[in-house]
Image: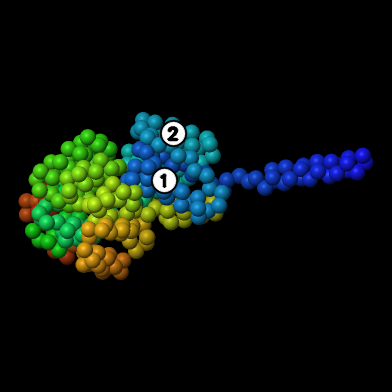
Amino acid sequence: MKARKTIALAMLVAFAVMLVGGLLIAQDPSLIIGLMLPGPKSDAGYNQTFYDAVLEVQENIPGVEVIVAEWVADADAESTMETMIQQGAELILPCGFAFQYPALAVAERHPDVKFMHPGGWESTGNFINFFATTQLHFYLMGVAAGMMTETDKIGFIAGMPLGYMYGNANGFHLGARAVNPDVETHLLMTFAWYDPTKEVAAVQALLDQGCDVFTYHLDSPAAVIQAVEAGGAYTIGFMSSGAQEYAPNGWITGLLTSWGGYITENAQAVIDGTWQGYRWDRQGLAEGMLEIGPFGDAVPDRVRQFVLAVAEGYRAGLIDTFIGPIADQDGLIRIPEGEFWGNDLMGDWDFLLEGMVGEAQ
């Protein structure tokens, strides 16, 4: 009997040690990140790229927790971020163009919390802006389009009329014209970042005009790509590699954003106490924030090799996309000979280039 009591006591003590040990081992998160999205995290486009990025941060840094808010309306942006901060978030990613000023307001109230907004222009001591140099690198996608088109008409479906969007479309056009001087780039806007009905109608309108290669600047590309695929045309993706699944036959390649490494560096800096504000970060292929997507089966090897060769030129700093002389649709020289438009001017586009069909509004 005494032996049984001794064994039972030993087991109880061992269980207590395991329990206490478990409690001691449990640790607070190294960092809580708040990710706020205007759409779904699995949209194969804009929103998914940021969700994939924070998952990468969790893989790279032990103990990181992420609070994700999807389908956040502009009017709910401030309250959503305030809730995240109440839940312990020390790094907020307000990933929507319209979230910039709501995030600035919240940042002012919480100077110890860091904010990273993609695609804007404001910065403070605890608020920075970042994005990829997509305008300069969309040229590569134009090269692919110019080599693949059979009708010499290519389409660009756009959401909102912003300078950055016009820069993407203009870079795309210049790349196409560099390899095919007869190309026309047709641009149509839906005036919404996400409106599948308008997007499908825009694709159909450009198909009717003879466009046989399409790209886009939208939040979710699913509706566009499916309509392009149904019309027997080609797709060039933008931002997320998830877009390729919607174009099993007509996929060419894509200009993909890769935020994970950059956000990991910033998250680690927050943890280390070395994070710095007053930044307007723009990175491209050379820094790893942009990638050339996989090529589709329909793309000839000569096209693949040529696009990759041009990409190497960008990585080496040998190519300037917007160097004059560059004329607008009316033939007026907007960028004089020898002048270069770089990252600092990409928000200033309010015109389309010679050989483009559409209207800058």
Quarter of the figure that contains the C terminus: top left
Q: Is 62 or 93 nearer to us in this picture?
A: 62
Of the residues shown, which amino acid type is indicated by label 1?
A: Tyr
Q: Tell me the number on the disc at residue 247.
A: none
Q: State the image coordinates of residue 131 (x, y, percent, origin top left).
A: 34, 51
Q: State the image coordinates of residue 248 (x, y, percent, origin top left).
A: 27, 51
From this viewpoint, which residue is outermost toward the left?
Answer: 330
Q: In front of the other: label 2 or label 1?
A: 1
Residue at left 41%, top 39%?
36
Provide the residue designation for mark 1: 51
Q: State the image coordinates of residue 211 (x, y, percent, origin top left).
A: 13, 49
Q: Secondary structure at mark 1?
A: helix
Compared with 158, 59 (above or below) is below
Q: State the image coordinates of residue 196 (x, y, percent, origin top left).
A: 25, 37
Q: Is 296 or 316 nearer to us in this picture?
A: 296
Label 1 neighbour load within 10 Å: few <14, some 14-19, many 20+: many
**Callouts 2 and 1 close, C-beta under 8 Å:** no
Residue at left 49%, top 37%?
84
Of the residues shown, which amino acid type is indicated by label 2?
A: Thr
- In space, the residues marked 2 and 1 are separated at their CA atoms by 17 Å
Residue at left 27%, top 38%?
194
**Which quadrant of the structure image shows residue 175?**
bottom left
Label 2 neighbour load within 10 Å: few <14, some 14-19, many 20+: some
Left or right: 262, with 351 as reference point:
right
Q: Tell me the number on the disc at residue 80.
A: 2
Work out whether residue 91 can be spotted.
yes
Q: Secondary structure at mark 2?
A: helix
Q: Is 45 or 93 nearer to us in this picture?
A: 45
